[in-house]
Amino acid sequence: MIKKFTYSILIFTLLSTITKGAENLKIKNDSIQRKWYVPQAAKIQHAGNIGFMSLGATYYLVDDWYQLSIMYGMATDHTEAKTLNTLALKNTFLIKKFHYNDFVLSPLAGLSINFGSTHNTYRKLPDYFPDKYYFQNKIHFAPFVGGMIYHPLPFKTIKGIDFYSEVATMDNYLLEAIRTDYVKFDDIWNISLGLTLYF
Amino acid sequence: MQQREFVKKLVLFGILTLICLLPACNIPFEYSPYDIIVEKEFQNLTAKNLTKLKAIEAGKSSFKIALISDTHTFYDEFQEAVEAINTRDDIDFVIHAGDLTLSALHKEFTWFNEIMGTLNKPFLTVIGNHDLLSNGKAIYEKSFGPNNYTFTFRGCKFVMFDNNIWENKNNDPDFEWFKTNLKNDGDYRFVIPVSHIPPWADQYNYGNEHVFNEMMAENNIQLSLHGHTHSFYHGKRYDQVDYLVIGDIADKAYAIITIEEDSYSIEQVSF
Protein backbone atom coordinates (compact mmCIF):
# COMPACT_ATOMS: atom_id res chain seq x y z
CA MET A 1 0.00 0.00 0.00
CA ILE A 2 2.74 2.46 1.04
CA LYS A 3 4.85 1.40 -1.97
CA LYS A 4 1.92 1.94 -4.31
CA PHE A 5 1.29 5.34 -2.81
CA THR A 6 4.95 6.35 -3.15
CA TYR A 7 5.00 5.30 -6.81
CA SER A 8 1.77 7.19 -7.47
CA ILE A 9 3.18 10.34 -5.91
CA LEU A 10 6.40 10.01 -7.92
CA ILE A 11 4.55 9.53 -11.22
CA PHE A 12 2.16 12.34 -10.41
CA THR A 13 5.05 14.61 -9.49
CA LEU A 14 6.97 13.87 -12.70
CA LEU A 15 3.92 14.41 -14.91
CA SER A 16 3.03 17.58 -13.12
CA THR A 17 6.54 18.97 -13.41
CA ILE A 18 6.33 18.55 -17.18
CA THR A 19 2.89 20.09 -17.55
CA LYS A 20 3.39 22.84 -15.03
CA GLY A 21 6.92 23.72 -16.06
CA ALA A 22 5.88 26.74 -18.04
CA GLU A 23 3.64 28.12 -15.37
CA ASN A 24 5.25 30.93 -13.47
CA LEU A 25 2.61 32.12 -11.04
CA LYS A 26 4.50 31.87 -7.82
CA ILE A 27 2.74 32.82 -4.64
CA LYS A 28 5.78 34.76 -3.60
CA ASN A 29 9.11 35.68 -5.12
CA ASP A 30 11.64 33.66 -3.26
CA SER A 31 15.02 34.72 -4.52
CA ILE A 32 16.84 33.76 -1.32
CA GLN A 33 18.85 30.56 -1.44
CA ARG A 34 17.82 28.63 1.64
CA LYS A 35 19.13 25.44 3.18
CA TRP A 36 17.08 22.39 2.23
CA TYR A 37 15.77 21.92 5.73
CA VAL A 38 14.52 25.48 6.22
CA PRO A 39 10.78 25.43 5.52
CA GLN A 40 9.15 27.87 3.14
CA ALA A 41 6.13 28.25 5.38
CA ALA A 42 4.64 27.30 8.74
CA LYS A 43 1.09 26.11 9.35
CA ILE A 44 -1.26 26.12 12.28
CA GLN A 45 -4.43 24.08 11.88
CA HIS A 46 -7.55 23.40 13.90
CA ALA A 47 -9.08 19.89 13.61
CA GLY A 48 -8.85 17.77 10.45
CA ASN A 49 -8.19 14.50 12.30
CA ILE A 50 -4.66 15.60 13.30
CA GLY A 51 -5.41 16.98 16.74
CA PHE A 52 -7.34 19.85 18.23
CA MET A 53 -4.49 22.08 17.14
CA SER A 54 -1.56 21.13 14.96
CA LEU A 55 1.59 22.94 13.95
CA GLY A 56 3.74 22.21 10.96
CA ALA A 57 6.52 23.17 8.60
CA THR A 58 5.83 23.39 4.88
CA TYR A 59 8.26 22.61 2.08
CA TYR A 60 7.72 23.22 -1.63
CA LEU A 61 8.44 19.95 -3.38
CA VAL A 62 7.54 21.03 -6.89
CA ASP A 63 7.61 24.76 -7.47
CA ASP A 64 5.06 26.10 -4.99
CA TRP A 65 2.05 24.09 -6.08
CA TYR A 66 2.99 20.77 -4.50
CA GLN A 67 3.69 21.34 -0.85
CA LEU A 68 4.59 18.89 1.85
CA SER A 69 3.69 19.92 5.38
CA ILE A 70 5.03 17.99 8.33
CA MET A 71 2.40 18.51 11.02
CA TYR A 72 2.28 17.57 14.67
CA GLY A 73 -1.14 17.44 16.29
CA MET A 74 -1.24 17.83 20.02
CA ALA A 75 -2.96 15.73 22.65
CA THR A 76 -6.01 17.46 23.93
CA ASP A 77 -8.57 17.22 26.68
CA HIS A 78 -11.24 17.64 24.03
CA THR A 79 -10.84 13.99 23.15
CA GLU A 80 -10.48 12.79 26.77
CA ALA A 81 -7.48 10.82 25.50
CA LYS A 82 -4.41 12.35 27.07
CA THR A 83 -1.91 10.32 25.09
CA LEU A 84 -3.28 11.17 21.70
CA ASN A 85 -0.53 12.41 19.37
CA THR A 86 -0.59 12.66 15.62
CA LEU A 87 2.16 13.21 13.10
CA ALA A 88 0.96 13.98 9.60
CA LEU A 89 2.70 14.19 6.26
CA LYS A 90 0.33 16.43 4.44
CA ASN A 91 0.68 16.57 0.66
CA THR A 92 -1.14 19.63 -0.67
CA PHE A 93 -1.62 20.43 -4.34
CA LEU A 94 -2.67 23.95 -5.33
CA ILE A 95 -4.86 23.16 -8.30
CA LYS A 96 -5.17 26.58 -9.97
CA LYS A 97 -4.27 30.05 -8.76
CA PHE A 98 -6.59 32.97 -9.30
CA HIS A 99 -5.26 36.48 -8.76
CA TYR A 100 -7.52 39.21 -7.47
CA ASN A 101 -5.76 42.48 -6.62
CA ASP A 102 -3.09 41.39 -4.16
CA PHE A 103 -4.92 38.22 -3.25
CA VAL A 104 -4.28 34.76 -4.60
CA LEU A 105 -7.12 32.28 -4.32
CA SER A 106 -6.63 28.61 -5.02
CA PRO A 107 -8.67 25.46 -4.74
CA LEU A 108 -6.55 22.70 -3.28
CA ALA A 109 -6.60 18.95 -2.87
CA GLY A 110 -4.29 16.47 -1.29
CA LEU A 111 -3.60 13.44 0.75
CA SER A 112 -2.47 13.43 4.32
CA ILE A 113 -0.68 10.44 5.79
CA ASN A 114 -1.49 10.48 9.49
CA PHE A 115 0.47 8.55 12.11
CA GLY A 116 -1.74 8.27 15.18
CA SER A 117 -0.47 7.19 18.54
CA THR A 118 -2.76 6.24 21.39
CA HIS A 119 -3.75 3.02 23.18
CA ASN A 120 -3.66 -0.20 21.17
CA THR A 121 -2.54 1.36 17.91
CA TYR A 122 -0.13 -0.85 16.05
CA ARG A 123 2.09 -0.52 13.01
CA LYS A 124 3.76 -3.79 13.90
CA LEU A 125 1.81 -6.09 16.16
CA PRO A 126 3.37 -7.22 19.47
CA ASP A 127 4.84 -10.71 19.38
CA TYR A 128 1.93 -12.36 21.18
CA PHE A 129 -0.35 -11.73 18.18
CA PRO A 130 -0.24 -14.17 15.28
CA ASP A 131 1.02 -12.61 12.04
CA LYS A 132 -1.51 -10.41 10.27
CA TYR A 133 -4.06 -10.77 13.08
CA TYR A 134 -4.98 -7.11 12.55
CA PHE A 135 -4.29 -4.73 9.74
CA GLN A 136 -2.12 -1.90 11.08
CA ASN A 137 -4.20 0.88 12.67
CA LYS A 138 -1.54 3.51 13.30
CA ILE A 139 -1.30 4.99 9.81
CA HIS A 140 -4.31 6.45 8.06
CA PHE A 141 -4.60 7.97 4.62
CA ALA A 142 -6.78 11.04 4.62
CA PRO A 143 -7.74 12.66 1.31
CA PHE A 144 -8.92 16.27 1.43
CA VAL A 145 -10.16 19.12 -0.74
CA GLY A 146 -10.40 22.76 0.14
CA GLY A 147 -9.48 26.30 -0.70
CA MET A 148 -7.08 29.00 0.40
CA ILE A 149 -6.76 32.75 0.20
CA TYR A 150 -3.25 34.20 0.18
CA HIS A 151 -2.07 37.75 0.66
CA PRO A 152 1.51 39.04 0.70
CA LEU A 153 2.73 40.86 3.80
CA PRO A 154 5.07 43.82 3.84
CA PHE A 155 7.50 42.23 6.31
CA LYS A 156 10.99 40.84 5.88
CA THR A 157 10.54 37.62 7.82
CA ILE A 158 6.90 36.82 7.13
CA LYS A 159 6.28 37.56 3.51
CA GLY A 160 2.74 36.33 3.21
CA ILE A 161 -0.19 34.70 4.94
CA ASP A 162 -2.99 32.43 3.82
CA PHE A 163 -6.19 31.24 5.37
CA TYR A 164 -7.37 27.80 4.34
CA SER A 165 -10.24 25.48 4.97
CA GLU A 166 -10.37 21.80 4.07
CA VAL A 167 -12.93 19.03 4.01
CA ALA A 168 -11.34 15.65 4.66
CA THR A 169 -12.15 12.01 5.26
CA MET A 170 -10.12 8.92 6.12
CA ASP A 171 -9.36 5.55 4.56
CA ASN A 172 -11.50 3.50 7.00
CA TYR A 173 -14.56 5.70 6.55
CA LEU A 174 -14.16 6.01 2.80
CA LEU A 175 -13.98 2.23 2.54
CA GLU A 176 -17.21 1.82 4.53
CA ALA A 177 -18.97 4.43 2.39
CA ILE A 178 -17.96 2.51 -0.74
CA ARG A 179 -18.55 -0.97 0.67
CA THR A 180 -21.87 -0.51 2.46
CA ASP A 181 -25.19 1.11 1.71
CA TYR A 182 -25.61 2.11 5.33
CA VAL A 183 -22.66 4.53 5.50
CA LYS A 184 -23.47 7.46 3.27
CA PHE A 185 -20.86 9.71 1.68
CA ASP A 186 -22.33 12.63 3.68
CA ASP A 187 -21.39 10.87 6.93
CA ILE A 188 -17.66 10.62 6.49
CA TRP A 189 -16.38 14.18 6.13
CA ASN A 190 -14.91 16.61 8.61
CA ILE A 191 -13.78 20.20 8.29
CA SER A 192 -10.60 21.98 9.34
CA LEU A 193 -9.38 25.57 9.36
CA GLY A 194 -5.81 26.78 9.19
CA LEU A 195 -3.35 29.60 8.66
CA THR A 196 -0.06 29.50 6.76
CA LEU A 197 2.72 31.98 7.28
CA TYR A 198 5.18 32.24 4.38
CA PHE A 199 8.83 33.06 5.08
CA MET B 1 -2.38 52.53 5.93
CA GLN B 2 -1.35 49.69 3.68
CA GLN B 3 -1.50 47.30 6.62
CA ARG B 4 -4.93 48.52 7.70
CA GLU B 5 -6.24 48.02 4.18
CA PHE B 6 -4.76 44.53 4.13
CA VAL B 7 -6.30 43.56 7.48
CA LYS B 8 -9.66 44.89 6.31
CA LYS B 9 -9.54 42.79 3.14
CA LEU B 10 -8.34 39.70 4.96
CA VAL B 11 -11.09 39.88 7.59
CA LEU B 12 -13.65 40.40 4.85
CA PHE B 13 -12.44 37.40 2.87
CA GLY B 14 -12.19 35.27 6.01
CA ILE B 15 -15.74 36.04 7.03
CA LEU B 16 -16.99 35.46 3.51
CA THR B 17 -15.27 32.07 3.35
CA LEU B 18 -16.62 31.03 6.73
CA ILE B 19 -20.13 32.16 5.83
CA CYS B 20 -20.04 30.26 2.54
CA LEU B 21 -18.33 27.10 3.73
CA LEU B 22 -19.60 26.19 7.16
CA PRO B 23 -23.39 26.48 6.99
CA ALA B 24 -23.46 25.08 3.47
CA CYS B 25 -21.62 21.97 4.55
CA ASN B 26 -22.76 21.37 8.13
CA ILE B 27 -19.62 19.28 8.50
CA PRO B 28 -18.20 18.57 11.96
CA PHE B 29 -14.73 19.29 13.28
CA GLU B 30 -12.91 16.09 14.18
CA TYR B 31 -9.68 15.94 16.09
CA SER B 32 -8.75 12.29 15.65
CA PRO B 33 -10.25 8.99 14.54
CA TYR B 34 -9.36 7.89 18.08
CA ASP B 35 -11.49 10.61 19.73
CA ILE B 36 -13.51 9.40 22.69
CA ILE B 37 -16.76 10.89 21.50
CA VAL B 38 -20.13 9.41 22.44
CA GLU B 39 -23.33 11.36 21.84
CA LYS B 40 -25.44 11.80 24.95
CA GLU B 41 -28.25 9.56 23.67
CA PHE B 42 -25.71 6.73 23.29
CA GLN B 43 -24.17 7.00 26.76
CA ASN B 44 -24.77 4.55 29.66
CA LEU B 45 -26.64 2.15 27.40
CA THR B 46 -26.21 -0.88 29.68
CA ALA B 47 -27.95 0.89 32.56
CA LYS B 48 -30.66 2.25 30.25
CA ASN B 49 -31.35 -1.21 28.80
CA LEU B 50 -31.40 -2.85 32.22
CA THR B 51 -34.09 -0.36 33.23
CA LYS B 52 -36.09 -1.39 30.15
CA LEU B 53 -35.57 -5.04 31.07
CA LYS B 54 -36.85 -4.46 34.60
CA ALA B 55 -40.00 -2.92 33.15
CA ILE B 56 -40.89 -6.13 31.25
CA GLU B 57 -39.65 -8.64 33.83
CA ALA B 58 -42.80 -9.37 35.80
CA GLY B 59 -45.61 -11.73 34.81
CA LYS B 60 -43.82 -14.69 33.21
CA SER B 61 -41.05 -17.11 34.01
CA SER B 62 -40.07 -18.20 30.48
CA PHE B 63 -38.39 -15.90 27.98
CA LYS B 64 -36.55 -15.73 24.67
CA ILE B 65 -33.22 -14.09 23.89
CA ALA B 66 -31.87 -13.33 20.43
CA LEU B 67 -28.08 -13.75 20.28
CA ILE B 68 -26.06 -11.87 17.67
CA SER B 69 -22.33 -11.19 17.44
CA ASP B 70 -19.46 -9.84 15.36
CA THR B 71 -21.42 -7.21 13.51
CA HIS B 72 -18.14 -5.33 12.85
CA THR B 73 -18.79 -3.14 9.81
CA PHE B 74 -21.35 -5.44 8.16
CA TYR B 75 -23.81 -2.57 8.59
CA ASP B 76 -26.25 -3.64 5.87
CA GLU B 77 -26.63 -7.20 7.22
CA PHE B 78 -26.76 -5.80 10.75
CA GLN B 79 -29.66 -3.54 9.78
CA GLU B 80 -31.45 -6.52 8.24
CA ALA B 81 -30.93 -8.51 11.44
CA VAL B 82 -32.43 -5.75 13.58
CA GLU B 83 -35.38 -5.47 11.20
CA ALA B 84 -35.91 -9.25 11.35
CA ILE B 85 -35.75 -9.32 15.15
CA ASN B 86 -38.12 -6.35 15.32
CA THR B 87 -40.80 -8.34 13.51
CA ARG B 88 -40.87 -10.95 16.31
CA ASP B 89 -43.00 -10.21 19.36
CA ASP B 90 -41.81 -13.31 21.22
CA ILE B 91 -38.21 -12.11 21.75
CA ASP B 92 -37.74 -10.41 25.12
CA PHE B 93 -34.26 -8.98 24.64
CA VAL B 94 -31.11 -9.21 22.53
CA ILE B 95 -27.56 -10.07 23.56
CA HIS B 96 -24.64 -8.95 21.41
CA ALA B 97 -21.61 -11.17 22.10
CA GLY B 98 -18.95 -8.61 21.14
CA ASP B 99 -17.03 -7.09 18.24
CA LEU B 100 -19.46 -4.28 17.77
CA THR B 101 -16.87 -2.57 15.59
CA LEU B 102 -13.92 -3.36 13.35
CA SER B 103 -11.34 -0.80 14.47
CA ALA B 104 -13.07 0.70 17.53
CA LEU B 105 -13.13 4.19 15.99
CA HIS B 106 -15.74 6.54 17.44
CA LYS B 107 -17.69 6.77 14.19
CA GLU B 108 -17.97 2.96 14.10
CA PHE B 109 -19.47 2.96 17.60
CA THR B 110 -21.88 5.69 16.51
CA TRP B 111 -22.99 3.69 13.47
CA PHE B 112 -23.45 0.61 15.68
CA ASN B 113 -25.55 2.59 18.14
CA GLU B 114 -27.61 4.20 15.41
CA ILE B 115 -28.58 0.78 14.07
CA MET B 116 -29.18 -0.67 17.54
CA GLY B 117 -31.25 2.43 18.26
CA THR B 118 -33.84 1.11 15.79
CA LEU B 119 -34.22 -2.15 17.76
CA ASN B 120 -37.60 -2.32 19.51
CA LYS B 121 -36.29 -4.49 22.38
CA PRO B 122 -33.72 -4.01 25.14
CA PHE B 123 -30.19 -5.15 24.33
CA LEU B 124 -27.04 -5.96 26.32
CA THR B 125 -23.48 -6.29 25.06
CA VAL B 126 -20.08 -7.69 25.96
CA ILE B 127 -16.89 -6.13 24.66
CA GLY B 128 -15.03 -7.94 21.86
CA ASN B 129 -11.34 -7.94 20.98
CA HIS B 130 -11.83 -5.52 18.07
CA ASP B 131 -13.68 -3.11 20.37
CA LEU B 132 -10.52 -2.79 22.46
CA LEU B 133 -8.35 -1.43 19.66
CA SER B 134 -7.11 2.17 19.88
CA ASN B 135 -9.30 3.99 22.43
CA GLY B 136 -12.16 1.50 22.10
CA LYS B 137 -12.15 0.52 25.76
CA ALA B 138 -12.78 4.12 26.84
CA ILE B 139 -15.45 4.60 24.17
CA TYR B 140 -17.15 1.33 25.18
CA GLU B 141 -17.15 2.29 28.86
CA LYS B 142 -18.60 5.70 28.08
CA SER B 143 -21.23 4.30 25.74
CA PHE B 144 -22.23 1.19 27.66
CA GLY B 145 -20.68 1.02 31.12
CA PRO B 146 -18.27 -1.40 32.83
CA ASN B 147 -16.87 -4.28 30.74
CA ASN B 148 -17.74 -6.81 33.44
CA TYR B 149 -21.24 -6.78 34.89
CA THR B 150 -24.11 -9.04 35.87
CA PHE B 151 -27.86 -8.78 35.62
CA THR B 152 -30.83 -10.96 36.39
CA PHE B 153 -34.02 -11.60 34.47
CA ARG B 154 -36.95 -13.83 35.42
CA GLY B 155 -34.95 -16.01 37.78
CA CYS B 156 -31.79 -16.27 35.66
CA LYS B 157 -28.43 -14.61 36.21
CA PHE B 158 -26.28 -13.40 33.33
CA VAL B 159 -22.54 -12.88 33.83
CA MET B 160 -21.20 -10.52 31.16
CA PHE B 161 -17.44 -10.96 31.05
CA ASP B 162 -14.59 -9.25 29.19
CA ASN B 163 -12.43 -12.30 28.45
CA ASN B 164 -10.18 -10.72 25.80
CA ILE B 165 -6.48 -11.26 26.42
CA TRP B 166 -4.17 -9.93 23.70
CA GLU B 167 -5.88 -6.51 23.41
CA ASN B 168 -5.70 -6.18 27.20
CA LYS B 169 -1.90 -6.07 26.81
CA ASN B 170 -1.69 -9.85 26.94
CA ASN B 171 -3.05 -9.89 30.50
CA ASP B 172 -5.30 -12.69 31.69
CA PRO B 173 -9.00 -11.87 32.03
CA ASP B 174 -10.20 -10.93 35.50
CA PHE B 175 -10.84 -14.57 36.47
CA GLU B 176 -11.27 -13.63 40.14
CA TRP B 177 -14.27 -11.46 39.24
CA PHE B 178 -15.58 -14.19 36.94
CA LYS B 179 -15.27 -16.90 39.58
CA THR B 180 -17.02 -14.78 42.21
CA ASN B 181 -19.88 -13.86 39.93
CA LEU B 182 -20.45 -17.30 38.43
CA LYS B 183 -21.73 -18.45 41.84
CA ASN B 184 -25.41 -19.12 42.01
CA ASP B 185 -25.92 -16.77 44.92
CA GLY B 186 -29.64 -16.22 44.52
CA ASP B 187 -31.23 -19.58 43.84
CA TYR B 188 -31.31 -18.80 40.13
CA ARG B 189 -32.69 -21.34 37.65
CA PHE B 190 -29.69 -20.78 35.40
CA VAL B 191 -26.45 -18.81 35.62
CA ILE B 192 -25.47 -17.99 32.04
CA PRO B 193 -22.03 -16.50 31.31
CA VAL B 194 -21.61 -14.42 28.16
CA SER B 195 -18.12 -13.62 26.87
CA HIS B 196 -16.75 -12.87 23.45
CA ILE B 197 -14.09 -15.56 23.09
CA PRO B 198 -14.87 -19.26 23.56
CA PRO B 199 -12.20 -20.99 25.68
CA TRP B 200 -10.83 -23.09 22.81
CA ALA B 201 -10.29 -20.10 20.48
CA ASP B 202 -7.03 -18.42 19.49
CA GLN B 203 -6.45 -16.10 22.46
CA TYR B 204 -6.67 -18.87 25.07
CA ASN B 205 -3.61 -20.91 25.89
CA TYR B 206 -3.99 -24.30 27.53
CA GLY B 207 -3.72 -22.84 31.05
CA ASN B 208 -6.46 -20.27 30.58
CA GLU B 209 -8.67 -22.77 28.78
CA HIS B 210 -8.31 -25.09 31.76
CA VAL B 211 -8.99 -22.34 34.32
CA PHE B 212 -12.09 -21.19 32.42
CA ASN B 213 -13.54 -24.68 32.19
CA GLU B 214 -12.72 -25.48 35.79
CA MET B 215 -14.73 -22.47 36.92
CA MET B 216 -17.64 -23.50 34.74
CA ALA B 217 -17.60 -27.03 36.17
CA GLU B 218 -17.23 -25.84 39.78
CA ASN B 219 -20.27 -23.63 39.42
CA ASN B 220 -22.31 -26.20 37.54
CA ILE B 221 -22.79 -23.90 34.55
CA GLN B 222 -24.96 -25.45 31.84
CA LEU B 223 -24.88 -22.92 29.02
CA SER B 224 -22.19 -20.42 27.91
CA LEU B 225 -22.67 -17.86 25.11
CA HIS B 226 -19.93 -16.54 22.76
CA GLY B 227 -18.99 -15.00 19.41
CA HIS B 228 -15.54 -14.33 17.92
CA THR B 229 -14.98 -17.41 15.74
CA HIS B 230 -17.31 -16.15 12.97
CA SER B 231 -18.92 -19.56 12.66
CA PHE B 232 -21.85 -21.18 14.40
CA TYR B 233 -21.17 -23.86 16.99
CA HIS B 234 -23.47 -25.51 19.46
CA GLY B 235 -22.31 -28.47 21.47
CA LYS B 236 -20.71 -29.89 24.59
CA ARG B 237 -17.12 -29.55 23.52
CA TYR B 238 -15.75 -30.58 26.92
CA ASP B 239 -18.63 -33.00 27.68
CA GLN B 240 -20.24 -30.90 30.38
CA VAL B 241 -20.98 -27.29 29.44
CA ASP B 242 -23.19 -26.48 26.50
CA TYR B 243 -21.40 -23.88 24.38
CA LEU B 244 -23.28 -21.70 21.93
CA VAL B 245 -21.17 -19.64 19.52
CA ILE B 246 -23.00 -17.48 17.02
CA GLY B 247 -21.30 -16.59 13.73
CA ASP B 248 -20.84 -13.08 12.40
CA ILE B 249 -23.84 -11.14 11.19
CA ALA B 250 -22.73 -11.56 7.56
CA ASP B 251 -23.89 -15.18 7.98
CA LYS B 252 -27.38 -13.66 8.09
CA ALA B 253 -28.38 -15.69 11.11
CA TYR B 254 -29.06 -15.17 14.78
CA ALA B 255 -29.74 -17.66 17.57
CA ILE B 256 -32.82 -17.84 19.75
CA ILE B 257 -32.37 -19.12 23.28
CA THR B 258 -35.65 -20.09 24.90
CA ILE B 259 -35.50 -20.40 28.67
CA GLU B 260 -38.31 -22.41 30.21
CA GLU B 261 -38.94 -23.23 33.87
CA ASP B 262 -36.26 -25.95 34.14
CA SER B 263 -34.89 -26.27 30.62
CA TYR B 264 -33.67 -24.28 27.65
CA SER B 265 -33.56 -24.79 23.90
CA ILE B 266 -31.43 -23.31 21.10
CA GLU B 267 -32.52 -22.48 17.60
CA GLN B 268 -30.59 -20.89 14.74
CA VAL B 269 -32.69 -18.51 12.67
CA SER B 270 -31.76 -17.22 9.21
CA PHE B 271 -33.02 -13.87 7.98
Image (spheres, coloured by chain):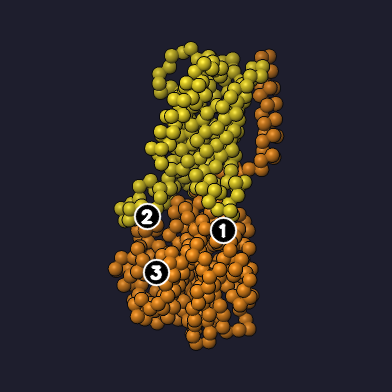
Chain colours: A yellow, B orange
* Farthest residue, direction bottom: B262
Amino acid at circle 1: Asp
Q: Determine the residue positioned at 67% across, 31% down.
A: B17
Q: Is residue B197 left or right of residue B56?
A: left
Is residue B231 placed above or below A4 in the rendered structure?
below
Picture coordinates of residue A60, whole percent (x, y): 47, 23
Q: Residues within 10 Å of mark 2 (few under 14, many from 20)?
A: few
Q: CA distance from mark 2 to mark 1?
A: 24 Å
Chain for disc number 1:
B
Q: Which residue position is annotated with label 1?
A: B76
Q: Is residue B157 visible?
A: no
Label 1, secondary structure: give it.
helix
Q: Which of marks 1 and 3 precedes in the sequence?
A: 1
Chain that bears disc 2: A
- Mark in front: 3 vs 1: 1
- Specify the amino acid type for callout 3: Pro
Q: Residue furthest left?
A: B206
Residue B103 lies, with reference to residue B203, above or below; the image says above
Q: Which residue is mark 3?
A: B198
Residue B121, picture quadrant = bottom right
Q: Residue at x 58, y 42 (%)?
A: A190
Q: Which residue is mark 2?
A: A133
Q: Nearer the viewer, residue B82 or B129?
A: B82
Left or right, residue A193 beside residue B104: right
> Residue A186, how many percent across, how many down?
62, 46
Task: Report how far apart the C-alphas of labels 3 and 1 lie in the structure.
Answer: 26 Å
